[in-house]
Image (cartoon, rainbow, N blue to C red):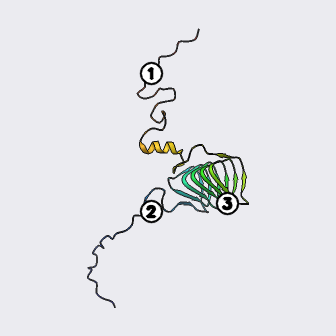
């Protein structure tokens, strides 16, 4: 039943075929969790999933956001997918918004699709989202431009809205009106 191993003590074990961890890919795997006993004052930015069970006073941007039943959030929420079970004071911007029966939202909700369970409380207005939100909470067009390396706007390229900036030809001052 027990046999002597041919392994010499201290000999390293050869690596085996192991599937790559889902947590290594941004936006995949286990969510970042703000536990019930944690209070955060400041903004949160994540490319992945975030679950709030505690208290946050600040804006939150993520791919997916869940506000737990006992959670309290004061700030702007922006994500592809937002699920609210707790209390939110501030604007919610997401492609998909789900308000559970325990949700209490005081603020406007901007969405592409929304679902509300009976009992959910909403004090604010609902409006349709013009452009989809990407995983970083930014408009999808901006995120796509950033991924391709192209600037999303003239200001991102170093050009100001008046046309000035690096590489631009300075405009002579206009003569005063007579």
Which residue is farthest top?
A: 178
For disc 1, the neighbor class at 10 Å (few under 14, some 14 to 19, many from 20) is few
Quick check: 108 above or below 6? above
Please identify the quarter of the rendering in which residue 36 is found. bottom right
Report how far apart the C-alphas of labels 1 and 3 lie in the structure: 56 Å
Of the image marks 1 and 2, the number of the one nearer the N terminus = 2
| Left or right relative to 55: residue 158 | left
Which percent across, then down, holds residue 126? 68, 47
Q: Of the numbered discs in the image, which one, if any, rests on residue 170?
A: 1
Numbered disc 2: secondary structure: helix
Please identify the quarter of the rendering in which residue 4 is found. bottom left
Q: Of the numbered discs in the image, which one, if any, rests on residue 22?
A: 2
Which residue is farthest bottom?
A: 1
Which percent across, then down, holds residue 110? 64, 47
Nearer to us: label 1 or label 3: 3
Residue at 32%, 70% (x, y): give it. 15
For disc 3, the neighbor class at 10 Å (few under 14, some 14 to 19, many from 20) is many
Q: Quadrant of the N terminus?
A: bottom left
Q: Do the residues labelled 1 and 2 touch (CB within 8 Å)?
A: no
Of the image marks 1 and 3, the number of the one nearer the N terminus = 3
Residue in the foreground of this view, choosing between 178 and 83:
83
Report how far apart the C-alphas of labels 1 and 2 lie in the structure: 51 Å
Which percent across, then down, holds residue 101? 70, 61
Residue in the foreground of this view, choosing between 75 and 133:
133
Q: Quadrant of the C terminus?
A: top right
Residue at 69%, 53% (x, y): give it. 105
Residue picked out by circle 3: 100
Which percent across, then down, holds residue 44? 55, 51
Report how far apart the C-alphas of labels 2 and 3 lie in the structure: 28 Å
Numbered disc 3: secondary structure: loop
């Amino acid at each position: 039943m027990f046999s002597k191993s041919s392994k010499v003590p201290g000999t390293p074990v050869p690596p085996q075929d192991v599937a790559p961890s889902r947590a290594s890919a941004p936006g995949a795997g286990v969510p970042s969790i703000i536990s019930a006993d944690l209070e955060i004052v400041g903004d949160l930015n994540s490319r992945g999933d975030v679950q709030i069970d505690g208290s946050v006073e600040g804006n939150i941007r993520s791919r997916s956001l869940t506000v737990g039943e006992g959670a309290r959030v004061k700030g702007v929420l922006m994500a592809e997918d937002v699920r609210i079970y707790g209390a939110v004071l501030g604007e919610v911007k997401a492609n998909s918004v789900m308000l559970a029966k325990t949700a209490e939202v005081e603020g406007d909700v901007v969405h592409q699709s929304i679902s509300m369970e009976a009992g959910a409380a909403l004090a604010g207005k609902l409006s349709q989202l013009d452009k989809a939100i990407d995983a970083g909470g930014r408009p999808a067009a901006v995120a796509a431009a950033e991924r391709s390396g192209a600037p999303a706007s003239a200001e991102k390229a170093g050009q100001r809205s008046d046309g000035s900036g690096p590489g631009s030809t300075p405009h002579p001052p206009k003569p005063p009106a007579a």
